[in-house]
Amino acid sequence: MDAELNSAPVLGDPQLIERLVVNLADSAVRHNHREREGSWVSLWTGTDRGRPVLRIANSGRVIPSDQVAGLFQPFRRLGAERVRGRGRDGLGLGLSIVAAVAAAHGGSVAARPRPEGGLSVTVTLPATGTRADRDAPAARAPRTT
């Protein structure tokens, strides 16, 4: 795994943000194409126009572009044969939780398949101190994570 972790302060619920990151990283690792030499997972954090951004990508199998949006729906799985290691019997909730946590914090999730295989997922959250931060359910007990 390759990681470039730049400062990206987030105002929100620390446990939910942690769950978002863990679910996203776990999915990228489990769906990576380990059999192929040179397989990789890449994680990047930083800001874009003042907004915190988390981007994770992997070298997994090719995902048809018409199936990408469905990956964020609850109980949606592309098939156990695509998963390596533990969790072959997963419920298909990991990425739907990522999308729900991002939305609850006023953010968004975008995914795009990589033509050579794998997926790149970008989570963008509101800049700290924005109206979306104040309106998010987690804003009742704001903490910077």
Image (spheres, helix red, strand yellow):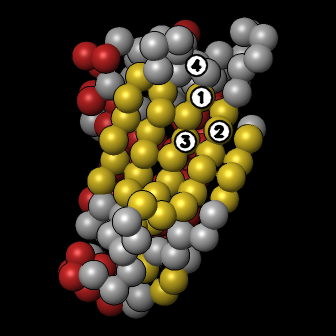
Q: Residue at x 73, y 41 (%)?
A: 2
For label 4, the residue is 60
| Residue 56: assigned label | 3
- In whole angstroms, how far apart are the C-alphas of marks 4 and 1? 6 Å
Badge 2 or badge 1: first in the primary sequence:
2
Q: Residue at x 62, y 45 (%)?
A: 43
Q: Amino acid at mark 4?
A: Gly
Q: Secondary structure at mark 3?
A: strand
- In whole angstroms, how far apart are the C-alphas of marks 2 and 4? 12 Å
Badge 2 or badge 3: first in the primary sequence:
2
- Res 42 quadrant in image: top right
For label 1, the residue is 58
- In whole angstroms, how far apart are the C-alphas of marks 2 and 3? 6 Å
Across and down, in percent, residue 125 comes to 36, 64
For label 2, the residue is 42
Q: In the image, 87: left or right of 109?
A: right
- The residue most toward the right is 37
Q: Residue at x 41, y 22 (%)?
A: 113
